[in-house]
Image: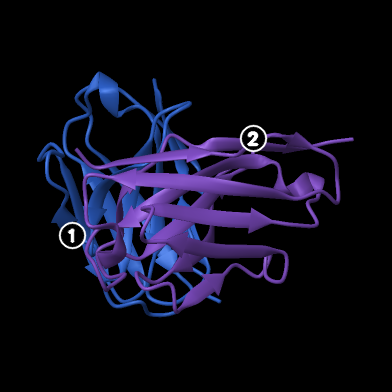
Chain colours: A purple, B blue
Amino acid sequence: EVQLLESGGDLIQPGGSLRLSCVASGFIFSSYDMNWVRQAPGKGLEWVSRISGSGDNTYYADSVKGRFTISRDNSKNTLYLQVNSLTVEDTAVYYCAKDHVGGTSYYGVDVWGQGTTVTVSS
Amino acid sequence: DIQMTQSPSSLSASVGDRVTFTCRASQPITTYLHWYQQQPGKAPKLLIYAASILQSGVPSRFSGSGSGSDFTLTISSLQPEDFATYYCQQTYSTPYSFGQGTKLEIK
C-alpha cells in the first residue's frame, strides 16, 4: 500500500524554524516528483513546493520563496521541508503529496499524507 | 502566475441531483487540470486528472471535461458521501495553483 506519513509540525513563535518530514512507503520513491501543499485553518489548498525525483530541481510558491527549502533523501524514502522565518500566515496543515505518474506533472497528485500541523503564535 | 477561479463558491443540492462545478484558468493550460474532493478534517482525494480521466476507484457518476481555460466537474446523481469541498488545480506551470474551492452542501 502506498503511504505518506508527515511529522515535525509544532507550535512555534514567529521568526522560528522547523523541519517537516514525510516518510514514503509502498512505491519507488526516487521515481516520483513530490510536493508540499498547505491549508490554513478554514481556508483552501495552497501549493507550496515541488521537488524532482532526483532532487535536482525545486520549485516554490512566491509566498515561501527564500524562507522554505524542499529536499529529499532517496536512501531514506523521506521528503523534507525546512521552514524558516515563520509568520502567523504560515499557520496551516502541511501535506506531502506524490505525483500520480513519475516524471511528469500532467496527471496531478494521487496520494496525500494525513498532514502535520504548524501553528505560529507568540 | 496562473490564477484558477472556481464557481460557485458554494452550492446547495439534494441527494439525486445533477450538479456541475466550473473552473477557469487565467491563461490556457491545455488539459493540465485536476479535480480533488476534500471531506472535513481529511486530506484531499484525487477524482479526475488530465481534465477528464477518472481516477481508479472513483465512482462513474463523477466526470470532467474541458480544455484550454474552461473546465467542468459534473456529478450525475448526488450521493450522501459527495457533500464535501471540491478543488481544481493546474499543473501546467509552477506555481501549481488551486482554485478557491466549491463547498457542496445538503439542501
On residue B52, which mark appears? 1
Badge 2 marks a residue whose secondary structure is loop
The quadrant of the rendering that contains the C terminus of chain A is top right
Q: Residue at x 29, y 56 (%)?
A: B72
Which of labels 1 and 2 is toward the front?
2
Bin the neighbour count of mark 1 within 10 Å (Cα to Cα): few under 14, some 14-19, many 20 and up. Answer: many
Q: Is residue B31 above or below residue A72?
A: below
What residue appears at the point 36 percent right and 59 percent down from the top-left corner? A75
Q: Amino acid at mark 2?
A: Pro
> Taking the image as drawn, is residue A45 in sight?
no
Circle 2 packing at 10 Å, graded few (<14), some (14-19), many (20+), is: few
Residue A99 is drawn in which quadrant? Answer: bottom left
Q: Is residue B52 left or right of residue A55?
A: left
Tell me residue B44's x, y (percent). Answer: 38, 40
Residue placed furthest toward the front: A75
Q: Look at 37% across and 75% down and name the residue there.
A: B92
User: Residue A120 vs residue A75: left or right?
Assistant: right
Count of numbered badges drawn on the protein: 2
Q: What is the quadrant of the N terminus of chain A in the image?
A: top left
Residue B68 lies, in percent from the top left, at 31, 77
The correct choice, above or below, for B56 with respect to B22 in the image is: above
Q: What secondary structure is marked by label 1?
A: loop
Which residue type does callout 1 highlight? Answer: Ser
* Dot label at residue A41: 2
**Circle 1 chain:** B
Residue A11 x/y as whole percent:
74, 33
| Nearest to the observer: residue B102 or residue A7 | A7
Label 1 and label 2: CA atoms lie apart by 30 Å
Judged left or right of residue A17, residue B79 is: left
Q: Residue at x 81, y 50 (%)?
A: A87
Q: Quadrant of residue B56?
A: top left
